[in-house]
Image (cartoon, helix red, strand yellow):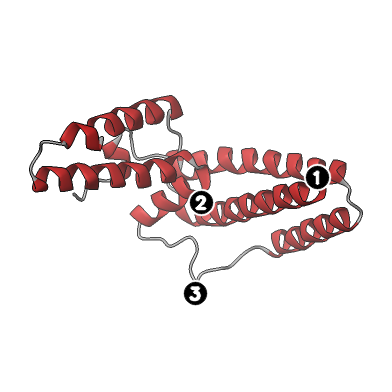
């Protein structure tokens, strides 16, 4: 079963995808490969359905998240967006990362949920900008160098957003 993630869901291999189609086709595969449908099947058929369900889950989780989708598309081009030997980031983005981390620490120490919410909104806006850029870089221009940089940024923003939500949860509890 070497089917690609996009092919599995009947989607074009591009960054801009129809998430409704992704969801619908995922549910269809889930239903078709559900273990209850293979109770009387032989072991080979049970294994095949389990492999399809596993592949569908992995593919769905990857394609529904823009950063993971971009990373997967780059991987299809032979590019590892995140690797131990390939972590270059522009200096201005590194400085921005430090500012965001300091703002999180300051808000955490002050139990300032409003500041964290504002920072989270900033992350979401930055993510939207990067999603738009990734659609251009990957789908329209095949500029994989720029797409790699944007993907790294988006992955970082996703991680920071998770961290902010954890801090908000800690303060609320």
Residue 62: in sight, yes or no?
yes
Q: Which residue is mark 1?
A: 172
Question: At which x and y percent is residue 66?
Answer: 51, 42
Which is closer to the viewer, label 3 or label 2? 3
Q: Image point 23% across, 48% down: which residue? A: 51
Q: Secondary structure at mark 2?
A: helix
Residue 149 in the image: above or below residue 134 = below
Residue bearing mark 2: 147
Residue 15 is left or right of residue 165, and the answer is left
Residue at the spot 71% in from the left edge and 65% down from the top edge: 91
Residue at 71 percent of width and 51 percent of height: 166
* Crowd around label 3: few <14 · some 14–19 · many ≥20 (10 Å): few
Whether residue 33 is visible, yes or no, is: no
The residues tagged by marks 1 and 2 sit, at their Cα atoms, a distance apart of: 37 Å
Q: CA distance from mark 3 to mark 2?
A: 17 Å
Q: Residue furthest front?
A: 39
First in sequence: mark 3 vs mark 1: 3
Residue linked to disc 3: 85
Category of crowding for the residue at label 1, using alpha-carbon neighbours closer than 10 angstroms: few (below 14), some (14–19), many (at least 20) = few
Q: Earlier in the sequence, mark 3 or mark 2?
A: 3
Farthest residue to the bottom: give it: 85
Spot occupied by residue 162 in the image (x, y as percentages of width and height): 65, 50
Q: Is residue 44 left or right of residue 26?
A: left
Q: Secondary structure at mark 1?
A: helix
Check whether the beta carbons of the residues at disc 3 and disc 2 lie within 8 A of each other: no
The one of 103 and 11 positioned closer to us in this rendering: 103
């Amino acid at each position: 079963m070497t089917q690609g993630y996009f092919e599995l869901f009947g989607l074009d291999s591009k960054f801009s995808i129809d998430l409704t189609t992704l969801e619908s086709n995922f549910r269809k595969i889930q239903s078709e490969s559900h273990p209850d449908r293979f109770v009387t099947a032989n072991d080979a058929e049970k294994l095949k359905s389990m492999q399809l369900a596993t592949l569908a889950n992995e593919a769905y989780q990857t394609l529904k998240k823009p950063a993971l989708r971009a990373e997967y598309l780059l991987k299809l081009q032979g590019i590892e967006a995140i690797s131990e030997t390939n972590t270059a980031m522009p200096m201005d983005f590194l400085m921005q990362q430090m500012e965001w981390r300091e703002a999180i620490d300051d808000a955490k120490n002050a139990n300032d949920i409003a500041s964290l919410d504002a920072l989270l909104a900033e992350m979401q806006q930055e993510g939207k900008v990067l999603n738009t850029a990734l659609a251009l870089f990957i789908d329209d221009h095949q500029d994989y160098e720029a797409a790699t940089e944007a993907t790294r940024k988006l992955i970082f923003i996703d991680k920071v957003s998770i961290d902010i939500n954890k801090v908000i949860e800690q303060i609320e509890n």
